[in-house]
Amino acid sequence: MAQLSFAKDALSTSTDYAACNPVLGQVSSELENQFHRRKLLASLRGQTIRVPDLKPLFSHWPTKTNDGIDQMRQDIHKWLDSTVAPGNMLAGLQASDFGLFGATWWPCAPFERLRIVTYLAVWLFTWDDEIDLSDGTMWNEFGAAQSYREQTIAYVRYSLGIDVDKPSIENRIILNFDPIGAAVRGRYTLEQRHMFLKEMEFFMEMSEREQILRLSGGIASMEEFWEYRLGSSAVTVCLALNEFSWDGMDLPLQFYADGDVRALFRHTNTIISAVNDLLSIKKEIKRDAIDSLIPIIYFRTNDIQTAVQQVVAFIENEIKDFDAAAASLIRKYLDAEPAIQNHVHKFIDGCKYYSTGNLTWSLETDRYGVDHVEDRSGDIVMIL
C-alpha cells in the first residue's frame, strides 16, 4: 500500500493561549477540523471525475453468477419486506439488487448457503447504514452507537452458541442476525465460530474508531484510514464465511493463521474497499461523507483526477500482491492430499470471486448510480 501512504498531517494550528488551555484548545481544534471538512466537501461538489474501466485489471480472475440468482432475488426481497420497516431505507435496499450481490460473490454456493451469506451481507449493510449514513439514526449519536455495538456483539455471541444466556435486545436490525447465527452454529465448529466472532468484533471496533474520527472533524491520514477501514469495511466478516459457502470444504483451523492466508484476506479487503471508494464516491458526497480514499487523497493533492489514478494504480498492485500470496500458498500444499489441494484452490478462487463479484455488482446496482460514458470505453464519468 506504499503508493497510498502519506505522513500524518497536523491539522490543528491553535494559538499559544489555546494550547495553554486544554478545553479552549480542544474546542479550537474541533472547530478548525470541522471547517476543513466543510471546505473539502464544498470543493468536491460539482467536480467531474473519470474512472477508467476496471474490468481489465481482473481479466485473469474468474467471474461467475450463481444459478440460484432468480430465487435469491425473490428470497431477499421477501426477507427485507419482513425484517425492515417500510420507508426510504427499505426502498433503497430493495433497489440495490442484493440477489445479484450474493450470486456474484458466492457463485458456487449451494442455495441454502447462498441464502445465509447473502443475508449476512445485507445485514452488514443495514447495520452499518444506521451509523455511517448522514440520515442514519446514529450518525451523530456516539453514545447510542456504542450501545448498538455492545448489544450487537452480545446477540452475535448468543446466536453463535458461544454464550448461553439470551440478551434482552429489542433492536430489529440486531435481531435480524438470528438466521445467520443459527446457520453458522450448525455448520462451524466452536473454534470456527470464535474466528468468525473475532472478525465481527474487529468490524465493531473499527466502526467505533471511524465514527470517533468523523465526529472529531478530523480528516484521516492514509495510515489512520487503513487502520479503521480494514475493519469497518466488514469484508473480513464475509471472508470468515468463505469456507462456509463451499459444499464439503473442510480446512484445518491453523490454515487461517498462515501468513499467506492472512495476506489473501488483507488484499481482498483492500481491493474491495478501494473499488467501492471509487465507484461510490458520488453517493458518498451526496450524503456529506468524505471519509474515503478519493476525498482523503484529494485533500493532500488538490487534484481529484490524480486521486483517481492513484487508487486505480493501488488496486492493480494489490491484485499482483494477491496473486503472489496465492502462488506461495499453493506451493505449500503441493505435497498435500488431492482433496486438501482442491480445497485450497477453491478457497483462493472464493476470495477472487469476492473481488470480481463486488465489481460486477457495483457497476450494476442502483445503490451507487454508476453511469458509463457513451463511447463504450468502459470508463465511468461522474459529476459529484
Image (cartoon, rainbow, N blue to C red):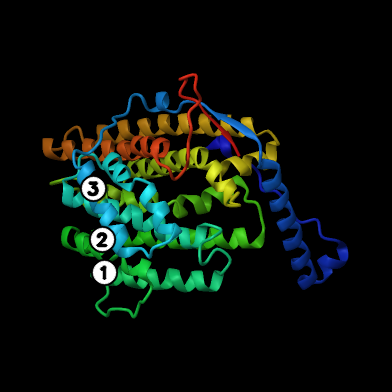
* Element class at badge 1: helix
Please state which amino acid type lies under the numbered disc 2.
Ile
Instruction: Identify the residue at horizontal 17%, vertical 52% (top origin).
Output: 112
Could you tell which of marks 3 and 1 lies nearer the N-terminus? 3
Please state which amino acid type lies under the numbered disc 1.
Ser
Disc marking residue 72: 3
Instruction: Identify the residue at horizontal 55%, vertical 63% (top origin).
Output: 139
Measuring from the top left, give residue 269's x and y in whole percent.
41, 44
Measuring from the top left, give residue 308's x and y in whole percent.
57, 32
Instruction: Identify the residue at horizontal 22%, vertical 60% (top origin).
Output: 184
Would residue 31 appear left or right of 271 to someone viewing this image?
right
Residue position for label 2: 180
252, above or below 278, in the image: below
Measuring from the top left, give residue 290's x and y in whole percent.
60, 49
Instruction: Identify the residue at horizontal 35%, vertical 58% (top origin).
Output: 123
Find the distance from the CA under tag 3 to the CA under tag 2: 15 Å
Measuring from the top left, give residue 4's x and y in whole percent.
57, 38
Find the distance from the CA under tag 3 to the CA under tag 1: 23 Å
* Element class at badge 3: helix
- Is residue 243 visible in this depiction of the protein? no
Find the distance from the CA under tag 2 to the CA under tag 1: 8 Å
Quadrant of residue 322 within the rendered picture: top left
Residue position for label 1: 159
Could you tell which of marks 3 and 2 lies nearer the N-terminus? 3
Locate the C terminus by quadrant.
top right
Please state which amino acid type lies under the numbered disc 3.
Met
- Is residue 282 visible in this depiction of the protein? yes
**Dot 2 and dot 1 residues touching (CB under 8 Å):** yes
- Give the class, few, some or many, for how many residues have Cα within 10 Å of label 3's Cα (few <14, many ≥20): many
